[in-house]
Structures are given as C-alpha cells and as structure tokens.
Amino acid sequence: MGASTFLRRLFGGRGGTPGGVQHLCALCDALLSESGEYASTALAREALAAYQGLDERGRSQLFEVLARDYSPSPEAVGRSASAYQADPSPDTLARLLETVEPARQELFRRLNMAPGGTAALVEMRRVLLRNLKANPGWRVIDADLMHLLRSWFNRGFLRLERIDWRTSALVLEKLIQYEAVHAIQGWRDLHRRLEADRRCFAFFHPQLPDEPIIFIEVALTRSMSAHIQPLLDIASPVTPAHPDCAMFYSITNCQEGLRGISFGNLLIKQVAEELKREFPHLRRFATLSPIPGLRRWLDRKRSERPQELAALARLEQPDWHLGEDTEALQRMLPRLCAYYLLHAKQGDEPLDPVARFHLGNGAALERVNWMGDSSGSGMARSAGLMVNYVYWLSELERNHERYWREKAIAASPQVEKLARECVLAAPPEKGAAA
Amino acid sequence: MGASTFLRRLFGGRGGTPGGVQHLCALCDALLSESGEYASTALAREALAAYQGLDERGRSQLFEVLARDYSPSPEAVGRSASAYQADPSPDTLARLLETVEPARQELFRRLNMAPGGTAALVEMRRVLLRNLKANPGWRVIDADLMHLLRSWFNRGFLRLERIDWRTSALVLEKLIQYEAVHAIQGWRDLHRRLEADRRCFAFFHPQLPDEPIIFIEVALTRSMSAHIQPLLDIASPVTPAHPDCAMFYSITNCQEGLRGISFGNLLIKQVAEELKREFPHLRRFATLSPIPGLRRWLDRKRSERPQELAALARLEQPDWHLGEDTEALQRMLPRLCAYYLLHAKQGDEPLDPVARFHLGNGAALERVNWMGDSSGSGMARSAGLMVNYVYWLSELERNHERYWREKAIAASPQVEKLARECVLAAPPEKGAAA
Amino acid sequence: MGASTFLRRLFGGRGGTPGGVQHLCALCDALLSESGEYASTALAREALAAYQGLDERGRSQLFEVLARDYSPSPEAVGRSASAYQADPSPDTLARLLETVEPARQELFRRLNMAPGGTAALVEMRRVLLRNLKANPGWRVIDADLMHLLRSWFNRGFLRLERIDWRTSALVLEKLIQYEAVHAIQGWRDLHRRLEADRRCFAFFHPQLPDEPIIFIEVALTRSMSAHIQPLLDIASPVTPAHPDCAMFYSITNCQEGLRGISFGNLLIKQVAEELKREFPHLRRFATLSPIPGLRRWLDRKRSERPQELAALARLEQPDWHLGEDTEALQRMLPRLCAYYLLHAKQGDEPLDPVARFHLGNGAALERVNWMGDSSGSGMARSAGLMVNYVYWLSELERNHERYWREKAIAASPQVEKLARECVLAAPPEKGAAA
Amino acid sequence: MGASTFLRRLFGGRGGTPGGVQHLCALCDALLSESGEYASTALAREALAAYQGLDERGRSQLFEVLARDYSPSPEAVGRSASAYQADPSPDTLARLLETVEPARQELFRRLNMAPGGTAALVEMRRVLLRNLKANPGWRVIDADLMHLLRSWFNRGFLRLERIDWRTSALVLEKLIQYEAVHAIQGWRDLHRRLEADRRCFAFFHPQLPDEPIIFIEVALTRSMSAHIQPLLDIASPVTPAHPDCAMFYSITNCQEGLRGISFGNLLIKQVAEELKREFPHLRRFATLSPIPGLRRWLDRKRSERPQELAALARLEQPDWHLGEDTEALQRMLPRLCAYYLLHAKQGDEPLDPVARFHLGNGAALERVNWMGDSSGSGMARSAGLMVNYVYWLSELERNHERYWREKAIAASPQVEKLARECVLAAPPEKGAAA
C-alpha cells in the first residue's frame, strides 16, 4: 500500500468514519507498509491501544473498513490466476498467493507482534462473532482470524496443566467466571471441586499465560455416578482413596473468540492418560452429561404424535417429579431419551450437540440415568435425565473411526434395548428422520 | 483429497518412488483427509517418523512429490478466480482462498501437531534450502514453509533469556556448536564468555525449548573496544565493575531452517534495554564487527585502478602486518574501508552484509579500527580491520527511518572524513557505483 | 538409653499414662537409642503420627513425661561439672555438654527428620504455650523447642516473597485466616488488598512451603495516611500511579508456635528496600498503627487523677465520637496519647507493645491521628486514635542504636510538643514513671 | 559480654594477634552483645568478610582465640551445676544450659544470619578439620560447629534432585571437581555419565543452592556388572532400554566441612525408590565397589604368615595381571578377599570402610569380581578386585538391624563359601580376630 493511499486515508479519505477509527485505519495502513521491525512493533502496539479505545460503534465501523478495503482486488486476482493458468511455476504461484491473501491476514499477523497481541485478536474475534449474523459481510474478517488463530492455537502449542488449590487465584477466579455447565458458587464451591477426590485440568497457551483455554472437572469415584447433585454438593464428604472410576462431569471452553477450534477431544484423551498414570487401578473413564436438546425434541415429537406421547403433558407441571405416580414417565422417558440419542439426526450425525461431541471423540453411550439432574435447568433441558458416555481407552480409535466413516454410534446393549422399546420405535415412522 | 486419490497413491500410483517415500506420501494423504483429531495426531506422528527415516535420496523424492502434487490446480484456480471477479462476496472469497492455498500448507500445519513437529519442519526447511539452487521447482515448498514458520515464530512467541553459567549444559553446548562469528574453543572458552564482565542472551520459542533461536554475546567494558583478540582471550582477567560500554561482539542465528526470518534487530534492542536496566550508567551500546566483504571489494577495485591501489599488493604477502613499514597501508586501508562502507552498494543498500544489518537497524557507523582482528580469518576477510557500529537508543528510530526511506547511512564525522580522504573519492569515478 | 529402660517403659513402666502416650514414649525412647538412619526416620515418622493421634489429655501426659524424664540427671551434671572445673579440656567440655543437654533436644532433632517434622514441632510448641501458665514445669520443654526453632528459623533460611493475586489460593486463604490486625472479610476483601496500589509480602521457610511465617500489607499512597477505614474499604477506587508514600497498615505473625522469635524488623527492612527498588520516588515509609494499650492506661490514669481527667468520662458512652461537642476530647486525647507513648514505661521501654516494636526497630514517632480508626475495636482499644511511625531508611540504624543504648525515643517535634502540652505533663508528677 | 570486654578487646586486649584477627574478634564480640537485628545482620556480614580476608596464619590465630576465650567459665559452670543439683527446676536448668553452652555456638548462629553464612561456616570447619590433629585444643570449636551443622543439615532440609545434561553447568562442573571414586575426565566424560542409560542424583540444601552435598552415579544395565572399566568408557555405546539392574558405581561426599554427618544411606534408599518408580522392572540394586583396605591387609597378613601367602609376592611386580600363569592368584585372591570382608575387624565392625558403610546400611555382600578394576589405583588398592553389595529393598531393614544389634554381616552363600575355602580359614587361627 503506497504512501499516497496512506495519506489519502489519513486525511479524510474515509469520510464517514469518526476520528478514532480513522486514526486506527491510518495506523493499520502504516503498519502494513512498514518494513522496519522496531517501527512495526511500535505501530502494532499503538494500533492495539487505539482499537481497545473504540466503543461498540467504532468497532463496527472498523469491521466495515476491514471487510471492504482489505480484501484482494478482483482484477488483480484475475490477472494472477490467468498467469498461473498459463504457466503454473513457482513464481506465478507465489504471485497468486500474494495477490489472493487478504491484506487483513498480514495486518493481523503484525498486530500479533505487539505485547498482548494474541489476546487482543482473540477478543476481537469474540466481538466479531457476536455481530456476525447481523453483518454477514464481516464473514471475510472471521475467515482470516480463524485461519490465523487455528494456526497459532495448533495443539502443539498447548500445554496441559493440573489445576488445584495451589493454583494462582488469578486463574482460579477465571474458572468461577467461565464454568458453563454447572455454575461454581464462589470460592468454597470451587475449593470443594479441587479436593483430594477431584481433579481439574486445563489447556494453556504460551501467549495467554493466565487464561485457561478449556478446562475439565473430574470426580474420582467408586462405580459410575448416575446423579450430578451429590457431585456438586459443597458439603459432601471427601471420599476415601482407591477410586475405580473417573467421572468427567463438566467441560468448558473458555474463549469465545476461539469458537470452532476444537480442543475438547484432545483434552479428554490427555487427561485420561494422566489419570491412568496417577491411578493405575482406574477401570472406567466416563462422563455424566446433560442431554441439552431432549426437551425441545420431546415437545416437537409430542406435537407430531400426540396420542402416543400424551403422558408427556405432565412435564408441563412444575415440580412434576416430586409428585406421585411418576412410574409411567419413569418407564417412558429413558426409552425416549435412548431413541433420541440413537436416531434423532442433524444431517447424518446425532441431533444432540453433547452426543455429537462425545461420540465423535470415540466414546460409547453407556447408560441413561433417571433424575440424573433434578436442578431447575436439568428439569427444563432434559426432564431430569442425564447420560453416561464411556471412554474405553482401547476402543476410542475404533469407535472414532466408525463414527466418522459410517456415522455409527457405539452404544451399550442396555441403551440399545431401551431405544428398541421406545414407543416411537414402532411403525409408522420406521427409519424416518427424527 | 478424495478416497480414490488416496487409494491410487497408496497402491502404486507413484511408480518411481521407493517404498519409504511411497509410504510417507500415503500417510500425508491420509493425514490431509482425516477429520478426527486423535487419528490425525497419530498420523502426524507416524508421518514424521517416516520422514526422519528417509535418507537423502528419499527426501529428494519426497520434495519432488510435494512440489508436483500438492500445488493448487490451475483449472480450479481459474474457476474460483472468475467466480470471485464476477461477485466478490465472502463466499466466493472463501472458496478462492481454499482453492489457491497449496495443500502443502495444511499438510505442514497438521504435521506440526505431532510432538516435535515444529522442530521437524524447521529441520525440513534446512535440508530443503541446501538443495534449492539445484532444484528451483522446490521453491514452492519453501514458500509454504516460510509462510507458516514466519507466523509461528512471530516475535510475540519469542522470549528473551539470559544465558550464564547457571544455564543448562544442554543449551550451553549448543552455543559452542552454533557460534558462527568467533568460534568457541570448548567449555573453558565458553565459561570465560559468561563471566561477570560478560553477558549473553538468546531468544527461545516454546516449541523448541532447548534450542536457542539466536544469541548475542556482550562484553561490558570501560570505553569502546577497538580490538577483538583481548575480548576472546580465555586468560584475560575479569574486569572490575562499573562498565560504561556494552560491546556486542558476536551475534549468531542458530537455526538455518529459519533463514530469512529476522530476529537480530529485536534481540539487540531488547538486550540493550535489559542491560540499561541492570547498568543504568552504561553510556554506549556498540558492536565490534567484521567487514566480511572488504577484501574481495579491494581486490576488485585494485584490478580496476591498479595504479592508485598498487600499495595493496602487499596484502598478498602472508603476515604482512607483522612486517615493517606498514604506515602507508595503515593510512590507506581505513580510508578505503570507510569509503567501502559508505559508498559501495548493492542496489541502494550497502554492499557489506553486516553494514546492511546494523545500519538497517538504526545503528550508526562510528569508528574504523586498525588491526581490530589480527586472526587469520580477520586478516583474510578484512585486512585486519574491524568497525564499531553504535546503537544510540534515542536515535535508533530516526536512523532506521532515514535508512529505509532514503537509504541514508548514519556515520560519525570521523568516518565521513576518512571516506572523503580516500584515494577513490577523487575523480574520475565521482559518485559512480562502487 | 539402654534396652532395659526401653523395655521397662514399653511394658508398663509408666503406670499412669494411657496406651497412646505409653506407646509414643516407647517410640521416643527407641528413636533416641536408634543408631541406624532408616530406622530412625521410620521411627520418627511413626512417633509423629502417634503424637498427632493424641487428644488434649494425651498431650498433657506426654508433656509431663517429657518434662520429668528427659531432663539431665543432677548427679551426672554435678560429676561432669566437677570434672570440667578440675580440667577444662576439650574432652571434659564435650562430656559436660553431652550431660547437660536435655535428651529432649536430641529427641526433637530426630523427630524433625520425619517428613513434616518441623511443622509438627511448631504445632507442638503452639499447644505447649497455651498451657504453659497452668503448667510451669513444662517450661523446660519450651526452652528446648525454642532453642531448636530459633536455630532452624534463623533468618538465613527465610525467603521474602511477594504475595499477589497470582499467588496460590492455598497461601492466600491462610492470609484470610491469619490476619490479626484488620480482619480480611473474604476473597473480595483480600483481592482489594492485592490490587495495583497495594503490596503484600511474606517470609517463607523451606520446611513450611505453603505457610507464611509473617506477612505485611502495604498501601501505596500519595501523602501519609491518617485514617485506616479508607484503606480497608473494599469499594475504594484503585488509586493511580506515582505513589510517594508506602503505608504499612498491617503486620501479622502467623505461627503461634514461633512466638518469641522475631521476624518483623527484618521483614519491614527488606520490604522497604524492595519497594524502594520498584518505586524509586517513594519518599516515605510509614505505618498506620493502633495504640493497643491506650484505653487501659487512660482508665488507670483517670482513677489516679480524677479531676484533671474528668473529661474522659465521656469515653464510656457508646458512640461518643458521633455526638457533638467533642472539641475538648479532640484537644485532650492526642496530647494524652503523645504523653503515653513517650513517657509511659514498662521497665525502661515504652509500655505500648506496638511502640516498643517500631521504636525498637529504629522507626520514629511521627504523628497522632484523631479518629484514625473509628471501628468498634479501634474505639475500644485506643479511643479512635492511631499513630504513624516513620521508617527513615537513613536514620534507622542511628535511631535503633540510640533506642537500645539509651532507650531514647525518636519523635517528631510535633509529637513532642503534644506531649509537653498534655495535662499530665505538669507537676505534681514531673518526670515520674507513668 | 559487657562493653568493657568489648573495648578491652578492641584496643589491644589480645596483644599477640595481628590487626586483622583483632578486628575480627572485636566484630565477633560486638555481634554477640548486639541485641538489635539490623545491626547484628550487618555485623555478621562484616565479620564474615573479615574472616574471608584472613590468611592461613590469621585463621590459626582466630581459632586459638575461639578455643581459648569462648568456652564456658569453669567457675560459673560449677555454680550453675550446684544450683541445679540443689533444685532441678526449669529456672536452674535454663541457667545451667545458658552457662554451659559455649559462646561459640551463639556466635556461629549469628554468623549464620549473614548471606552466605552457612556456606562460610561449612568452609570454616573444612579448614579447621585439616589442622585438628596438630591443634587438639581446637576440638572444642569442631564440636560446636558439628553440633550446629548437624542440626541445620538435618535430613528434613535436604532435597533429592536428579542431575542430567539439563542441569546447570555451575552444578555440573562441581561434579567434575568433586568426584572422588572414579575421576571424571572433563565434560565429555561427564556427558557420557549422564546419558540415557545412566542416572545421577544429588542432595541439595536450601542454604547452599548450587552446591551438591553428596551425589551418586548409577548405571542401568542388564545383569549385574562385574567390571568397572566398561562403565567408565567414554566411547561405550548407550545401551538400549529395559534395564533389569541399577549399578551404583560411585558415591561422593562433596563437602569436607560436613564430614561426620552421614547422608549416604538416605541417598541410596531414596534413589532406589526413585528408580523403582521410573523402572518398575528393575530386579536388583547393587554397587560395584572398591575394597580400599585389601592390599594393605594382605601385606600385613603376608608378613604374619609368609609361607602360606608366598604366592602374594607376585603382586609386587608391576602389571603382574597382564602376565601368564595367574591361575594360582585368581584362585587365592578372591578367597582372601571374601575372608577379609567377613572376618577382618576394627572393633566389632568390618575393617574395610566401604564394607562398613554398605553393610551398615543393610546391604548384602553378593559377589567378588576378579579384575573388577584393572586401573592403576584399582590394582594398587585391591589387587584389581571389586565387590558387589546388593540392596534388596525388602531386606534392608532386617539386615540393618541385625548388623547394628549383632554386627552380623549379610553375605551370599557364594561369598561365604569363598571365605571358608580361604587359606587363612584353616587352623591355627580358627576364628581368631583377623
């Protein structure tokens, strides 16, 4: 970008944008045209500071400029593509790549040089994602950020760390703040979750030293847990040694700005190996998981097949599970749940997002638990049911491969039987999409 | 890459390549087509191991395949470019980027997931660079590796570490091995270079934990050093406290595989700041630098202007500097050196590579030192001369900017005077390119 | 101690003691007579476990045995002393030392070998101290523990560590638990005390890795604070940079079992040096301190000189300071306070323990602050007054020396004037002891 | 110590001592009489510096003063002892202890407060020990230093650290310098001893952070090594994985100033446990040890029983083992060695110091190795023989206890048979002391 562009932009070239954004865009152009390294680090630092000073409206204007002015020129692309077609040599390829790569990418790479640059770009993507639906044109920015962040957050750069009561308070308070599955009620609750019968692990990245990227909470138990409330009870006694089961009861992605970059399966696998090393006698690694899409699916099914599912009307009553005569539901719901997990699809994968995640990792659907989560949200989301997915270390790869090749779901005979006994399993809807 | 390609390649599609390379290519294709993360980490690991098992010939064959089969298809590029030209939308841009990016880049990103992946790719580029001249077609591979390594070795990821006698022997022995300017003669020599009147700093990268990327050696002195031998003398006494000068006497890039990614200017700047913090009374940061191109240039000039430079014939004699009557040379050579540094050009930059580096960083040419390096190589490369470049912290940015905008060289009045007094400064070649 | 003693003790030699104590004493005797090191480490470990299993009554019985049976034999002492007097040679001295040293010391040294031994002995002394008044005979145990702990907690072994929000939660929760001057109200309060305008430092000992020995809280302010409430206010804004004053507002000894071993003066001095390094522009290091003995002394004085001090009757009313017409007290109390600090004595040192501590460290009495602490306890202990002691780094040693040689108190002219104006300063008690 | 003593000493009280020592003694007295902590830390620092400035003669004079003037007064001891005999109360005991403890101990405790104090006292004892034979009166100083160092180097304060090629060069060069059993020939030799088939561990103390206290070198082998030369060969190949044997082939106490404080048995035990954790399949922990006293004992025996041991005359010839016809010696010497180890005594313990150490630790004498050490010193000390002591973890405590109670030596049947077959085993000296 030549000096003339630089000056035009600096002095009013972008009429509509207010001072802050205009100044920032000038900094970005200067940064892109700078060949010296001190200067560019200094400019990157200044540009980040300017970005952080923008309000919501300023950021929107910036994104507009980034989407509009930093994409490759269609004419230049056409020329480079033709040249490459005519003679696909290293030189024409190099020129093609250079022409096609949006200037945004180089801009973001240079911003990343400033102290705190990576964190700022993660944060920028967080803001961007929030507004992407309303501004589909900004998807070009997202694509560039995603491309770079995926490279910088390559698994090779992540390190697994155990979190316990010896961990820095700075990190611990972030667990409290980020926990997305079963909210942590302050420091006492957190402390209970880090006692001797619990484990917590997180991935960290060298550029975000005090920020967990993703973390998982594990309870060491004797036999596989069916209910979440005892695990979350602050007053529960610390159980004695010799666990045979590791229950993964919560896993949280902390950085919204890294959405779409998957860390979970790697985390579970490394944590399982770590635990196996510490407790060679662990026989089972299992989750105690919500079924977030169950209630919505039940409602839909009920409207489709009102007669067969009439009993589900009871779910509308508050605290229905505390009442009497719940036997019918206790028989019906687990079967519907098993059927839902095995047969309700989105494309050729399970409709349920948690099922997609664990089954895609190579876990097996092991058990459906009645009143697994009787909290308000547990009742609302999944009629109080929870499921266990089991990670058999020896079968992970096989399950994983069968899932990705054939979309085959590994499930225990018990769960398969439940699904077969489900009222919906019978005709008329034989094989129909759920 | 579809399954058919995969199978074709697996079963003999590349007739000419021997078993090892064929197997490795099959692994690479599998890695590119794998969507699950365990599997891809495992494949990446396996592919790296296969790569490390290849001999020279195998690597050449691999590079052939990488250059030939992993570049974008010209037809597809043409289609995507046309679509983008017709309608430059986020979707057409995304498709264009995807089509244009060589599959090699994704392959390298995935190899980087394996433990030791980054180190292996740096090493792969080292081997590639060595053979690039003979195989110009491989430049497409180099471009992709360079693109990724530049992103991963972004300055934001580097950390400065002091090296001293407390440092791990594993790292210290690498200094001995890598030192490129003034060879380190074993552990005693190294120890002397880490005494209380010396400093050594290196950049490290989280993915190469025991590998210095670049390191610099500094002597803390009273007044600016003119001669290198006293600094390199193992038996020299450790000088007392209160230095006023930091002499940068050696700077070595350790990783051939990162050639072209510049770390030196950032290192010098950070080290100068670090030293300023430790020794607030330091008045000067200067180098004691070789002039590697001087002798060759003198020879060339002598053949062009044999009469004026007749005295240089003496340089052909071994140990000429130990003889008598060197006054004439002692008068002539520093002037020629000053002239060389200020006026001999490659394009519009100095011909001398060390001058390009320091002047480009914003340093100033301060002094020419007679018999600055009387070692064999010092005599051979630069007739025993050395120069001091000075880093005035307050003027770095200005010098740097003037250098990059106008190719102006900051030099002391003393050096400018020497250049003016040079025999070549007179007509006939007034201002002619040197 | 021979095997016979061992067996006698093991099988009922100490009729009165219950099983646990008897077993423990047997272990102690075995430990003392053991010459092999594995065995003694194992025995030490077992003995500590047995000790930790004792209840209150068991510990009392143990202390009885330790006081009675592990002191040197008077006869043997007599013999060794005579031998030494007759011939004061290395051998007679060695024998004398051996005879005189209570077996308890060797026992404690051996217990200290077990993992956690040091912590257990510190804890044992804590229990012992609590019961010392009621059991004066146990002072012999205390003397031995003190002798050893003083040696093991030699300042050379302590390391200063900064405490901030990056510190381990394990350590931070101990600050909440131990803080003795201004109680910390949970994690939010703690967090406020570790913000950017605060500093906290502690001494740690290698044998008690997660246990602060003593810690100090510092507020960085502009000008010297006169009131404690603003410093303790969780909602107070974090003040901007460029402090000129470091206010030591709380210092807490954490380990009751180390009572009598002084760490405070060293801590204050090291912290002042540390802060001076971080903030070269700090002009003043001062405390904001309570005057814990003031109210009690005022009450005593009032009963001695009821007429002159009649106005003090008002202090009996709750919330007197919230009422009107406090001018008389506002004039009288600071003068009495200054008089108290300068003239009320215990022996030849100040009666007030906080004054003894700071003045003995070399600080100077700088200012008396009206309503420095208007909390309930502040009103109750010192009628709402607080004082500033100033640590002038350049005068510490001189003040310190004058204090210890002449018991001279360094005070500002302002405080000295207040004391002279005090109603008690006049005859009849001119110079009499307060 | 009152001020008058102080002044007397300062101004010439010790006529004979030169300026440096006189000044130091004045500092020591001031240090002992100082009650403030800053002052005493400053004095301790100054006194240490003065001590370090003394030459050999100055130190001797200092030791004279320390031995003469800092022992308890015989009269005061007599009085305190009588008072304690008359009434053995806490107070009389406290006074007795105070009177009896040499002022040296408090002096050393106070010197220990200075930075580097512990190291300086360890060094002081090293110098003292060297001159103790010539100056028996200094034993009182040694007793006090030993008393304190034993307490400060209590095993509870030691931490085990693995030493490898990642360790600081500062520590590694000390291994080269200290190694006392099989000298390390520079950095390459050291590197070989830290390769993947070797382990090295050391104890460190928090007050001597860069100083190993004791270290051990281990070779991981398949089957028990009989010869030391292959283990010491720099060029030997690094052996593949899956060792079944850990050979302790060198153990060195580094700090002469800690002589008499035993660390070795604890080190061996902890290292064995550490190795067992890393290599669960290790079947045997054994030493390959010299028999330092063998040759001397053989010479003595030969002079006692010249006829039976006539064959030993051959040992006088240089390189006898390289000659022919060594069968007779090859039969005779191992038997004599076994006899020596089992029956030659010093008191009721083995005469051989290495045997005393390992057998006292609970090891068992396993095997005698012909030409175990064919180096010059190996031939000179023990006629080329070496022995293996085995540490069976499960039998350590039993062996240890039997050794200490009955002085019973655990030996393999094979070694016992060798001893029975020894020419000296027959009458006339049946069972007589060797």
Image: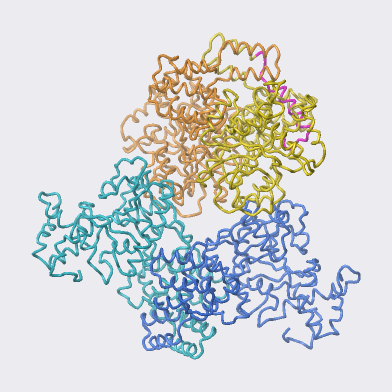
Chain colours: A blue, B cyan, C yellow, D orange
Q: Is residue C74 magenta?
A: yes
- How far from the left and from the top, in percent, is residue D398? 62, 35
- Residue stretch in magenta: C50-75
Q: Nearer the viewer, residue B8 or A356?
A: A356
Q: Percent position (x, y) of residue A69? A: 49, 80
Magenta stretch: helix, strand or loop mostly? helix
Q: Quadrant of residue B119?
A: bottom left
Q: Tell me if I can see residue D81 in this picture.
A: yes
Q: Quadrant of residue D371?
A: top left
Q: Farthest residue to the right: give it.
A: A324
- One can see residue D364 in this view: no
Location of the C terminus of chain C (image quadrant): top right
Q: Position of residue C406 (x, y in %)?
A: 58, 23
Q: Write the residue at 27% across / 71% down.
A: B348
Q: Is residue C376 left or right of residue B192?
A: right
Measured along the vertical axis of the image, is residue A103 above or below residue C292?
below
**On screen, B338 above or below C405?**
below
